[in-house]
Amino acid sequence: MARFDGQSGRAFRVDVPSYLTDRIGITMGKLAAYSCSVECLGYPHALFRAHRDLRITKQESHFVELELLNLIGEMGLSESQFRVIVEDYHNILEMRPGH
């Protein structure tokens, strides 16, 4: 967990790949330097803008999913096999027992 700006009330989980282990201090310092925008205090501004500007609407997502289901069906895969392939693992990581 890291809080990238001392004035922010939020902390974020940070997963660091093993190849950055020896550069974690420099990497975290750069993230903190880019996390002081008033638009998103405490969160790296470039990630904030990307999330905000490049968001795919639910309608677009649903249309693409239907197209993929059709193509996958033509290849002989079932819908359940398709769901396993495209599962958002962020959702899986955040699941809690009983949800």
Image (tube, grey):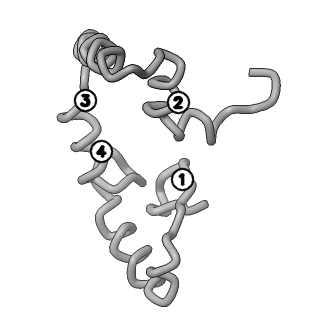
Any part of residue 99 in sight: yes
Which amino acid lies under the numbered mark 1 shown in the image of this protein? Answer: Phe
Quadrant of image for the C terminus? top right
Residue at the left extreme? 53
* Helix, strand or loop at mark 2: helix
* Helix, strand or loop at mark 1: loop
**Closer to the camera in the image, 95 or 67:** 67
C-beta proximity under 8 Å, tags 1 and 4:
no
- Image spot of residue 18 (x, y percent): 52, 77
Report crowding for label 1: few under 14, some 14 to 19, many 20 or more residues within 10 A (C-alpha): few
Q: Which residue is mark 2?
A: 84
Q: Which residue is mark 4?
A: 48
Q: Which residue is mark 3?
A: 55
Checking the image for residue 12, the label placed there is 1
Quadrant of image for the N terminus? bottom right
Which amino acid lies under the numbered mark 2 shown in the image of this protein? Answer: Val
Q: Residue at x 53, y 61 (%)?
A: 14
| Of callouts 4 and 2, the N-terminal one | 4
Q: Residue at x 33, y 74 (%)?
A: 30
Q: Toward which corner of the image does residue 50 lie, by quadrant?
A: top left
Report crowding for label 3: few under 14, some 14 to 19, many 20 or more residues within 10 A (C-alpha): few
Q: Residue at x 61, y 36 (%)?
A: 92
| Of callouts 1 and 4, the N-terminal one | 1
| Of callouts 2 and 3, the N-terminal one | 3
Q: Residue at x 32, y 70 (%)?
A: 33
C-beta proximity under 8 Å, tags 4 and 2:
no
